[in-house]
Image (cartoon, helix red, strand yellow):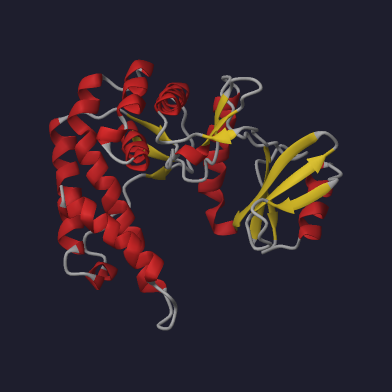
Amino acid sequence: MLADDTIRTTLRTAWHLQPDGCTPLDGEPTTSTRTVAVGDRRYLAVLVAGAERPRFEAGLAAAEHLDRRGIDTGAPVRAADGALSVPVGEHVLALLVFVPGRPLDGADPVDQQWWGDRLGAAHRGLAGFRHPGLAEWHPLRPDAPYLSCAGWLRPAITGAVTALTKLQITDRLTVGPLHGDPRPAAFRLDHDTGRIGLVSWGRAGFGPLMYDVASAVRHAGGPERARELLAAYEAAGPVPVAEIEGSLDTLLRFRWALEADACARALAALAPDAPAGRWRDHLDQARFALLDD
């Protein structure tokens, strides 16, 4: 990861800013995000690998689009030449507005109402937004060789993809730009202003809006525990109620399949002596959800 003095130099040359401080966001020097202080203003400086730049900038552009419509998103501060991000060695660096506030509590009924309402507002605000870097939302390949790591895995992935394919044949799903991972920590409630922001746009993509809803429901603990979230999203109106009711189970199953796929890929990439407990635990959690369907 780049040294902090390199980040400071880039901020001075590309953004014409003189940072007073540049601190790892979570206290770890290897983190990809720094908090930056410039006078009484705070920013986030975010680094990603250069190969990820197209998708990274698509998420930045989506955040900027929503920010112009009054939703706090941690929008990018464009460099002096107008660029969304700036190359720094093998990485690119972006500067984002810092959004104050606490993360939402996914188990709190009131927070769930804010959660569903803000996600719905983001989907409405992104209607018609397009960017060539928005990734397709469906990366699953049931024939991937790494799915052989567990006997149950390939049939479960195949079943989730088949169910989604059937749904898309029989029902017309509402599609558009996606946040990609609208977990409670991606939302910020500022008690001083009452505003609720939606940040962390690094996984933005394009696909059925119900994929974002299913992701939120997964983080809430399932449909029974996400009633306030779903009610608020329905009231926001980006997706017809009948579509929500008819597609949620299938999209939630597909969301778990994506998690299982990610765990299997991570396990396949580990060195033989590397600890695998965390990925095995996540894979077991996905197995329980998929086979309990």
Q: How many marks?
A: 0
The residue at 52%/45% (across/down) is 202
Q: Nearer the viewer, residue 130 or 45?
A: 45
* Quarter the N terminus occupies: bottom right
Position in image of residue 60 (x %, y %): 57, 39
- Up the image or down, 48 lies above or below 234; here it is below
Q: Nearer the viewer, residue 36 or 57?
A: 36
Q: Answer with left or right where residue 24 lies relative to residue 198.
A: right
The residue lying furthest to the bottom in this view is: 273
- Residue 19 in which image quadrant: top right
Q: Answer with left or right where residue 228 lies relative to residue 196.
A: left
Position in image of residue 114 (x %, y %): 46, 24
The residue at 42%/26% (across/down) is 123
Q: Answer with left or right where residue 163 lies relative to residue 192.
A: left
Position in image of residue 243 (x %, y %): 22, 25
- Up the image or down, 277 lies above or below 169; here it is below
Is residue 265 shown to the viewer in this render? no
The residue at 81%/59% (across/down) is 5
Is residue 132 shown to the viewer in this render? yes
The residue at 39%/38% (across/down) is 206
- Up the image or down, 174 lies above or below 55; here it is above
Q: Answer with left or right where residue 39 lies relative to residue 124.
A: right
- Residue 173 in which image quadrant: top left
The residue lying furthest to the front in this view is: 108
Position in image of residue 41 (x %, y %): 78, 34
